Structures are given as structure tokens and as C-alpha cells.
Image (tube, rainbow, N blue to C red):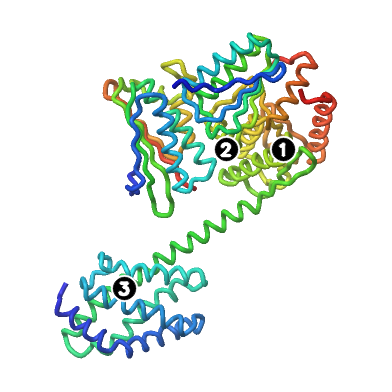
Amino acid sequence: MDNEESKRLLELLTARRADLLAQWEETVGASLRGRVSTAELGRELGELYDAVVDAVSKGGLAGRGEHFAVVRSLLVELSRTRARQGFTPTETAVSIFALKEVLEPLLAGSVEDARAYLQFARLLDDLGLFTVEEYARTREEIISAQSQQLLELSTPVVKLWDGVVGVPLVGTLDSARTQVVMEKLLQALVDSNSAHAIIDITGVPAVDTQVAQHLLKTVVAARMMGAECTISGIRPQIAQTIVALGIEFGDIPTKATLADALRHALMEIDKAAAARPAGLL
Amino acid sequence: MKEYPADEASREEVEIRSSGDVVKARQAVRVLAQQAGLSLVNQTKLVTAASELGRNTLIYGGGGTARAVIVRDVARVGVWVSFSDTGPGIPDIEQALTDGWTSGSGMGLGLSGARRLVDEFELDSAPGAGTTVTVLKWAR
Amino acid sequence: MSDRVPVLKIGDILLVSIQVDLEDQMVLDLQDDLSQQIVATGARGVVIDISALEIVDSFVGRMLATTAAISRVLGAETVVVGMRPAVAMTLVELGLSLGGVRTALNLELGLGYLRRAQDTPPARR
């Protein structure tokens, strides 16, 4: 790192802080078209400007070094806010790149100036890329949180009767979803004190070996806890696929419709109630 | 198994000399699993796997060491657990990982079952050179 | 090491409520205690409450299956009650089926089942 160059830059950045900052704000503000308030933008960029100056004065222009920790944490915050507010990656990175534009006319005078500018530009490129990375990371987090929410929304466990809970499955079943279904269904058995569960697959377009395997596991787990699990809503073509694929449904009780399954469960409850003696012990 | 950056502050080590130590080891694993934010089911799966492997270390390896640490990948957190002993080792690894196969009096579900309960599994063993089993479970 | 799981007698039913993280030796002791108590008390039913157990591994699973088989030989029916959902899902993944072990969601349903089973001749599974 050439000290001479970072010194020149520092002098310039410190001496003309107010002026440069105002220009930077203006450029960024124009690209964001007023979707961030001027006050907030001023605060963000002001903090960032000071942090960059501070970092360069401490350890030169290497953007991934230790001394840039404060700058990076400010950039993380900035990228996250922008990603949440629905800005594009370009609009986010422009906040950094705009500083180059501001500095360019000031540093085109001499060869030394140009060299200093190039080095600083390289630093800003690096920081700009960093914001894009952070932006992408935040978006990924948002997406995975949303798909988790969707997963939970799409599998409601409903109480059908005293002692009977049911889960109507709609859409394609994969392992992640089946895991959620299993957990919710088994927990519902405990919470509602139900010894019968019905999984209705009327809305499931296809049953392959893997899906069958998942359903089987749910039924076995329910049985281990002392509950009986019936699968209903097996459409004719699915029944054909099951047989054609040679999938063993074993001794899992299956019913054609949810009504049949409910009737079956109620009959079982009746049988148990009839045999129940007056006292507990 | 791929190496992931470990959260050194979370590192736990338990000497396994008795069945009480196996309990200690799985309790340590549970604490880490909770810290790493594993779902209840995944916590239960990992702790159960640790229990199986810890018992193997004690019974077949004649005791050893359990190590556990929280690890991080790009966008996920997990718990890494290893059990190592200096016992007789496993002559036929392929066979040892088969359901129902047992050299002792167990049900033969220890190794093969533990493997199904975790996301990553590695068995390192040779006759006379001891055995190390490493497992990893991600939070999601 | 001397910790033992208490076996309680209520009428002709033995109740075991496991409240601690089990060491292997405690599991074996419990199996012994139970078979002796069944004979000593002439119990007709055994309820093992595992609702406090955070994990059931193959060792404990095997104990449950063995205990159920032993008590059946001794003329008592065993019901395991209160298995947590996470434990059930783990056992399925582990490959343990607990075949032959009666289960019920909770203590009340378990006792109800035993009462019914005593009214009718026991069905062999």
C-alpha cells in the first residue's frame, strides 16, 4: 500500500467532508428516487463516510482487512435494510459506487492523483461487492423464512370430532413438508388427547414410493404413541399407481373418503367406550 | 466429512468411562443442539444418535472420548459430534453398518440407526487402531 | 449408580413413571425389579410412563419390548404411555418398531385400556 496515496486521499476526504458528503447524498438520493428519506440517507452515508476515512487512516486501502470491520458492519446494516425495503441489488450497491463518481473530477489533475483515485476506486468496488453479497444473503434468509411459513400454513391440523384429528394435505409432498406434517399431527394428538388421526390425501396429485414411505412413517410413529392413523382420500388413479409401483401400504388402514375414515374412527371410539367400566381402577 | 468452521467457545469434551459418562455426553450434546437452534425433533434425533454411539464407544471400544462443537456453514448452523476410542476397531465397516448386524448383544441398530438420524456420518476404523465416529446435524 | 426407578402398586396394576435421564444400569435394574414385583404382587397390568423421557434409544426401546414380553409370560399386560412425538419420530427413523408393545397417549387412556383388557380375554399380538 502506497502511503503517499492514501495520505493524499485522506487529506482530501477530511478537508472537503461536508462538500463531498453532500454530493454523495445527492447522487445516491437521485438513484433511489426519494424512497429513502433525506435525513436517513444523510445519517447512513455520514456514518459510512466517517468510518471509511477512519479505516483508511488506520490501515490503508485493503477493504477486507481487520481495520474495515466497522465499515463492513455498517454495510451489512445498509444492505439488510435495503433488501428488506425491496430495493434491487443495483440500487443497493450504487450507494457505494456513487462515491467514486463524486471523487472522480477532483482526482483527475495529476498522475499521482489519478493513481490515488484508482486505488480508492478499487477499495470501493470491493465494498460494493460486499454489499451485494450481503444483500443476496438477506434475500435468501427472507426466502427461506417465507417458505418455512408457507410450509406451516399449508398443513393445518383440524379437530374433526372429540378424539379425532385430521390433516387435509394439498399439493406435492416432499420430505421437508412431511416432517412438518408429522410433527404437527403428532403434537395435535397429544394436545387434544385424541387417539385417532386421519390424513386426507385427496389434494395430493401423485403418490410415489417416497411419499408412501413418508406416510408410512407418520402412521408408525402415531401408532407408537398409542394412536391409530387412517389415510383417506385415495383417488382411483392413485390407488392404481400404488399397486403398479408395488408399494406396500402394509397394515395401514386406508379409506376412500374422509367421511369413511371418520365413520371408522367414531366406530372405534364407540367400541372403546362400550367396554369402559364405571370406575377407572 | 467436510470441515466446517467451528464455534470454539462452544466446544465440549467428555471422557467416556462409565454409562454415567454416556448420559453426561448426551446432555452436553443436547445443550449444544439447543444453542444451535435445532428443532425439537432434530435435537431428539441427534441426542439419540449420540446415545447410541456413546454406548458403542463404552461397550465395544472400552471407553474413549466424546467431543462436540457448534459449526457454521454459509447459511446454516449445526452440531458436530465425534466419539473416538482406542479399542479393537471394526474389521468390516460395511457389515457393521448393516441393520440388524451385531457383534455383541444389542439389536444391531446402533451404528446404522445413528447414521439415519443425522445429516452427515463418517466412520473411521481399522482393526487394532480404534474407532472414530463423527456425525453432524444441521439446524434445518 | 444405586438410583432405581420406583415401581408403584395401585390395585392390581404396577405403575412405573420414569422421571430421570436413564443410565443403562438403571434400565436393567428396572427390568429386574418389574419382573420380581409382578410375581410378588400378582399384578395383572403394568403401566410404564415415559412422558418425561426426552430420548428413547435402542437400549431403552429394547428394555420396553423385553419387559412387555416378560410380563406377558408372567400374566400381566404392559402399556407404555406418554411417548413424546419427537421420540416417536426418532424411533421410526432409528428403525425400532417396538412391535408387541401396547402404547397409549397418556396415563388415563393406558389405565382404561388395561381395565378393558382385563374384562375380556387378552388378545395375543
Location of residue C5 by image quarter: top right
Above or below, A95 against A187 in this view is below
Mark 2 — on which chain does it sit? C
* Inter-mark Cα distance, 2 to 3: 49 Å
Packing grade of label 3 (10 A; few <14, some 14-19, many >=20) is some
Q: Which residue type carries mark 3? A: Asp
* Inter-mark Cα distance, 1 to 2: 16 Å
- Do the residues at discs 3 and 1 belong to one chain? yes
Q: Secondary structure at mark 1?
A: loop
x and y, in percent, of residue B82 in the image: 36, 35
Residue position marked by numbered label 2 in the rendering: C86
Q: Which residue type carries mark 2? A: Ala
Q: Which residue type carries mark 1? A: Asn
Residue position marked by numbered label 3 in the rendering: A125
Q: Nearer the viewer, residue C85 or A25?
A: C85
> Of circles 1 and 2, which is in front?
1
Mark 1 — on which chain does it sit? A
Residue position marked by numbered label 1 in the rendering: A193
- Asked if one can make out residue A246 in the rendered structure from this viewpoint, the answer is no
Q: Nearer the viewer, residue C25 or A244?
A: C25
In the rendered view of the protein, which quadrant contains the N terminus of chain B?
top left
> Of circles 3 and 1, which is in front?
1
Location of residue A208 by image quarter: top right
